[in-house]
Each structure stands twice: as structure tokens, then as C-alpha cells.
Amino acid sequence: MCKTTIEFCAGNMHHDGTEAFMQELEKDASLQVIEYGCLGNCGECYLLPFALVDGLIVSAADVKLLKERVMKQACSDREREASGGRS
């Protein structure tokens, strides 16, 4: 079973709460959390908190909503994997 990968851009940490959220996720052994210097999504990065969840951009107006969306995407990835890749 593969871990869900959640990637953050170091440049996105200026959004209040993004860094704390990343650190919270790092404590979850079922997730692989990676911080890069740049993910190449500069427009998104400047405007909104975002993360890549298994390569898909997940963004939100604030970190509270980002948490909800990231966890929903991570859970759907795990469910899809558990079902053998069937959606």
C-alpha cells in the first residue's frame, strides 16, 4: 500500500497557518509530506494556500478550508487504492 504524497511549496508558507498545517500532516505516518523550494505554481502560490496531493493541485481561500480539501483528497486516494484502483 502506497502513502498519499502531499507536497508544499516553501514560498506558500506566507499564508497564515500553512506551515503549521504541513507540520501537523508530517506527524501522520500514512502520509508522505514533502516541502520543495518551488513547485512551479507561482500564480496559485501567491494568491492562495495550496498543496499537491498525489500530483493534483488542492487550493482554498484559507488554511482551514485547505485542510478539509487536502484530507478529503487524501482519503479518496486511500479509498481508491483500497478498492484496487476502481473509482
Image (cartoon, rainbow, N blue to C red):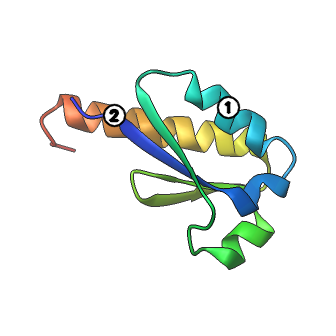
Left or right relative to 26: residue 56: left
Q: Distance between the residues labelled 1 and 2?
A: 17 Å
- Mark 2: few/some/many CA within 10 Å (<14, 14-19, 20+): some
Relative image position of residue 66 (x, y in whole percent): 67, 45
Q: Which mark is residue 61?
A: none
Relative image position of residue 2 (x, y in whole percent): 26, 34
Q: What kind of residue is marked 2?
A: Lys
- Mark 1: few/some/many CA within 10 Å (<14, 14-19, 20+): few
Q: Residue shown at 44%/31% (left/top)?
A: 31
* Residue reaching furthest to the bottom: 43
- Relative height, residue 44 to residue 63 (above, below): below
Q: Residue shown at 41%/59% (left/top)?
A: 55
- Relative height, residue 57 to residue 83 (above, below): below
The residue identified by callout 2 is 3
Viewer-proximal residue, 60 or 13? 13
**Which image quarter is the N terminus in?**
top left
- Relative height, residue 33 to residue 1 (above, below): below
How many labels were placed on the picture?
2
Q: What kind of residue is marked 1?
A: Gln
Relative image position of residue 13 (x, y in whole percent): 78, 53
The residue identified by callout 1 is 23
Q: Helix, strand or loop at disc 2?
A: loop
